[in-house]
Image (cartoon, helix red, strand yellow):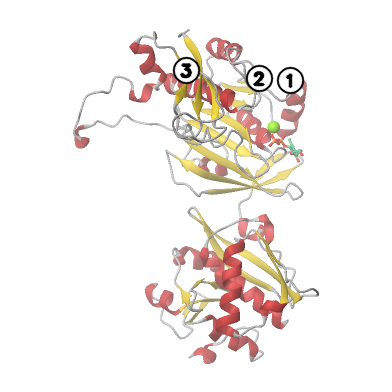
Amino acid sequence: MAKIKRSFRCRDCGVHTPQWSGQCPSCQAWNTLVESLEPGPAQPKADRRKASGDLIHGQGEVQAIDQIVLEERWRIPVPDGELHRVLGGGLVPGGLCLLGGEPGIGKSTLLLQLALRLTDLTTLYVSGEESRQQIRLRAERLGSLHSRCLLLCETETTAIFRAIEETKPQLILVDSVQTLFQQELDSAPGTVAQIRHVAGEFMQYAKQNHVPVILVGHVTKDGNLAGPKVLEHLVDTVLQFEGDRHQSYRLLRSLKNRFGATHELGIYQMDSDGLKEVLNPSDLLMSRHWQNRSGIAIGNTREGNRSLMVEVQALVSPSNFGQSQRNSTGFEHKRLQMLIAVLQKRCRLPLSQHDIFLNLAGGLETSDPALDFAVCAALVSSLLDLPLSNRCAFIAEIGLGGELRPVSGMDARLAEARKLGFDKVVLSSHQGIEAGILPGGRKTKGLRILPMDFISDWTQTLRNHNNEPTESNHA
Ligand code: TYD
Ligand code: MG
């Protein structure tokens, strides 16, 4: 094994120092030095190259970009449609993936289920959290057991790599990176130094042996992957598993992907026998039990290549005390404040004396500005206590002038609305023209498109006690 030296490294600027001190000698930041194991100075050159990963090994010569011959990078298909898509089309040999999520959200279930379904690959599931009996019991609930799914309950990495050398797995699943440790380091498991080192060891193994590795990482209460983002730049792919633990659906997002698009979204439902792929997510994100209830509007959000219809729920009620409350779940709080200000200023709605609660049904979180219009529609509907039609969707961004602005991917959004049986979509007039749809409420393939210029046009329509806008109101 290469000679290793114990030293300290600054989390911010990355400088090495042989001794610990409270302040970084280079960038002067406080409390940023953490223990790390570094290759010693006597290490031969070849070893140092190895440490940087096999991908760039011995590629020191300069070459014109069009002369580089592409190696065929095959992918391993994953027998789980949602995970396959979120990974950008399966696992990449040598790819290191980090799966983050709060405790109890279903990370271990997702990985064990994957190992059980991959019957033609030898998969090693390394657990530092549960006993063999516990895992076997869980596996029985999840699917049929087979002998190519190998299990190792161990937390010390030298022993783990010994087992890996013996069994030569084609996929390694590590649950979780926070429980593992390298005995050469004095720090406890779960510290930044240990997490960095352990992940580095798996990185090196993955790259040199072309084996995909998935590391589970717990997130802290503030939503960051524990170990201040130390792993996010190291790994190739960062997946986040999230959702409300009291509800059954779970969202799998890709936050970083060197081998595919980010912002892909996978949706699962947690049942008594494991995670099930949700094939029609829009159905899950809309309750549809709200006919004749005010404060509910349907919008659309794009998550990766997917387009989802989302139910926006608002409750606007007079404030009892001086300070009115604003509470938002799933939608950015600052954006909500901005939309409230626009409605006050441009539509003269008395929202400042009201408590406002906003919620995206289904536990979805999104930052797609196309949802602005639906948020405003829900707020206005609740304030005026006028229910909206549940067959009408609102899809537009709203500017500070109260203007409805076009949004990207409108064709896919309209296709989703049409698929779910919506009758009408209200959108920006500019959008209508861009998408080749003529203004004036023309029907396209069974969907009536109602283009509008300003949010005030629409609120005026609603104030006139029409529950939904009609062509005559804005022609
Ligand atoms: P788990 O995968 O252990 O979460 P994590 O590894 O992210 O901490 O999942 C824990 C929860 O999932 C637990 O509350 C029980 C529930 N669960 C089911 O509802 N159905 C199942 O089939 C399984 C295996 C777990
Ligand atoms: Mg777990």
Instruction: Please say if 311 is above or below 20.
Output: below
Q: Of circles 3 and 1, which is in front?
A: 3
Q: Quadrant of residue 464?
A: bottom right
**Is 428 situated left or right of 116 in this image?**
left
Q: Position of residue 433 (x, y in %)?
A: 39, 77
- Residue 38: mark in rendering: 3
Residue at horizontal 65%, vertical 19%? 151
- Residue 151: mark in rendering: 2
Can you tell me whether the CB of the residue at mark 3 lies under 8 Å from the nearest atom of ligand 2?
A: no
Q: Position of residue 44 (x, y in %)?
A: 36, 9
Residue at horizontal 64%, vertical 58%? 330
Q: Give yes or no for contact between labels 2 and 1 (Cβ–Cβ under 8 Å).
A: yes
In this figure, which residue is indicated by the disc labeled 1? Answer: 132
**Is 386 situated left or right of 95 in this image?**
right
Q: Give yes or no for contact between labels 3 and 1 (Cβ–Cβ under 8 Å).
A: no
Q: Amino acid at mark 1?
A: Arg
Crowd class of label 3 (few under 14; some 14 to 19; many from 20; radius 10 Å): some
Q: Amino acid at mark 3?
A: Glu
